[in-house]
Amino acid sequence: MVVPVLQVIGYQNSGKTTVMGHLLKKAAAHGIKAGTIKHHGHGGAPDYADSEKDSSRHFQAGATISTVEGEGAVIIESESGLTDLENLLTFYRTLPLHVILVEGYKKESYSKIVVIRQQEDTALLDQCTHIKAVISAVPIDRPDLAVFDYQDVTAYTEWFRNWLKEA
């Protein structure tokens, strides 16, 4: 069985890490083992584990393993004690996971949730591929996609659980 991959993408400060946290809590509550990979796309190497950093927030939210990568540095945090996405996924697929959640890597071709904070962010809907759902703080008219209000955590986490059953 191939472990399904779901990306959560959006611009900086769009709420990606918050969405990831909600998805991870839903997974953990249902016994789903999730691993996370976060792309550090802000320039420079990522900071090492710090309880306020996104990778630590993923781990604290229930990820079995969490990785952050940027400019060749990789930080892995795991309860059970690679420099590009494919290498990380190859490693992750050796682990007993049910799903791999990837924050970032907009140009990769895995199933995606796009997080929209403001109207100009909607350009991502035309620039990216494999979009399955949109979580937005602004109205979106895309009948071809599952669209959720950013505040409706229950709806989009249930969508995630159903997506996982079908993946």
Image (cartoon, rainbow, N blue to C red):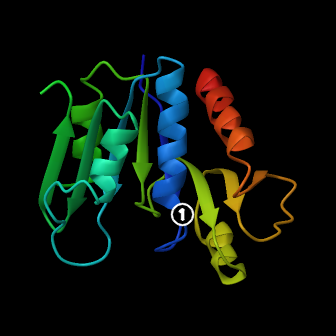
Residue 36: tell me if it is visible. Answer: no
Vertical placement of residue 20 versus 79, above or below: below
Q: Amino acid at mark 1?
A: Gly
The answer to whether 48 appears left or right of 37 in the picture is left
Vertical placement of residue 68 versus 122, above or below: above
Identify the residue at horizontal 24%, vertical 47% (top origin). 67
**Viewer-nearest residue: 118 or 87:** 118
**Viewer-nearest residue: 149 or 50:** 50
The answer to whether 117 appears left or right of 91 in the picture is right
Q: Quadrant of the C terminus?
A: top right
State the image coordinates of residue 94 (x, y, percent, origin top left).
24, 23
Vertical placement of residue 114 versus 32, above or below: below
Identify the residue at horizontal 27%, vertical 32% (top origin). 92
**Viewer-nearest residue: 15 or 160:** 15
Residue 68: tell me if it is visible. Answer: yes
Identify the residue at horizontal 29%, vertical 59% (top origin). 52
State the image coordinates of residue 8 (x, y, percent, origin top left).
51, 53
